[in-house]
Amino acid sequence: MRNKNLKKLSEKVIEAYENDKPVILMMGAHVIKTGMSPYIVDLMDKGVIKHVAMNGAGSIHDFELSLIGETSEDVQTNLEDGTFGMSHETGQMMNDALKTSKVGYGKRIGELISKFRMKYKNYSILNKGYEKNIPVTIHVAIGTDIIHQHPYCDGAAIGRTSYEDFKIFTDSVSKLEGGVIINLGSAVILPEVFLKALTIARNLGYKVEKFTTANLDMIDHYRPRCNVVQRPTSQGGQGYFIKGKHERTVPTLYHLIKKGIK
């Protein structure tokens, strides 16, 4: 895939990596469903990506991929008969883990995947984060995820662990000067979370002005364009909008980065 902004973005990522500046990836669940996890896991393993932030659905797809090697269902058919998202294993195991968690949502589910030695854990972003001590934070909107339908769901536990992750994410954003933050396929939740985290960091006196942002998606949505690409970079940073399917943009960006890192 040829896109001059992808090349420019890869150069910014390589520069941040070489200068030991953070590269933060925010992502929606569809990135996992389209099979892009191995690219992200490898960049985490190589020390390029220093933080991954996902929505709640991302954690579910990552967990199911680790457990059974796939993550999908026929939404239309299952919605009609009331079985959509009613997988018992996913709902029980994830909710039980969060109820007893003394850490953030992402770290707890990563620990679950790792300690259960799930068959396909090597494809898991959460597992890689746990094993490499790389923050993987989960930012949840109550009612948006299938595990919220499950009788084991504890809204207080989900809120508590996701809020812990928001604080961890804000700490990473406070160190973003000279770094890169990429939004990959999250149209609403993560652009909003990022804007609030950036506001807190600046309010507390952290200098977060000159950094690179990028939004990669197949559609130009309002919130990513404003809250990721435009508004945060008004003090001297650079923002990129890159349009295309994840199946094309992610592998291309990955190979451009791999060519440039030592």
Image: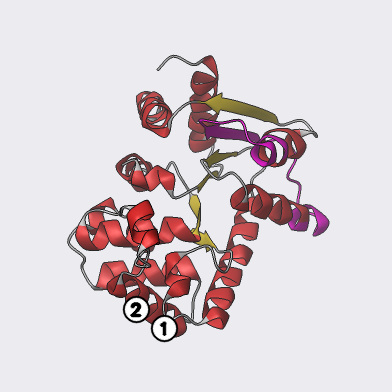
Please tell me in which quadrant of the rendered image residue 156 appears: bottom right
Q: Which residue is mark 2?
A: 92
- Contact, mark 1 vs mark 2 (Cβ under 8 Å): yes
Left/right of residue 121 with respect to residue 32 in the rendered view:
left
Q: Residue 152 has which mark?
A: 1
Tell me, yes or no, whether the highlighted magenta stretch contains residue 158: no
Please tell me in which quadrant of the rendered image residue 84 appears: bottom left
Q: Amino acid at mark 2?
A: Gln
Q: Amino acid at mark 1?
A: Tyr
Residue 24 spot, x, y in % from top left = 53, 46
Q: Quadrant of the C terminus?
A: top left
Closer to the camera in the image, 255 or 85 = 85
Please tell me in which quadrant of the rendered image residue 226 appears: top right
The residue tagged with tag 2: helix, strand or loop? helix
Earlier sequence position, callout 1 versus callout 2 = 2
Tally the marks: 2
Instruction: Give the residues in magenta.
Output: 200-226
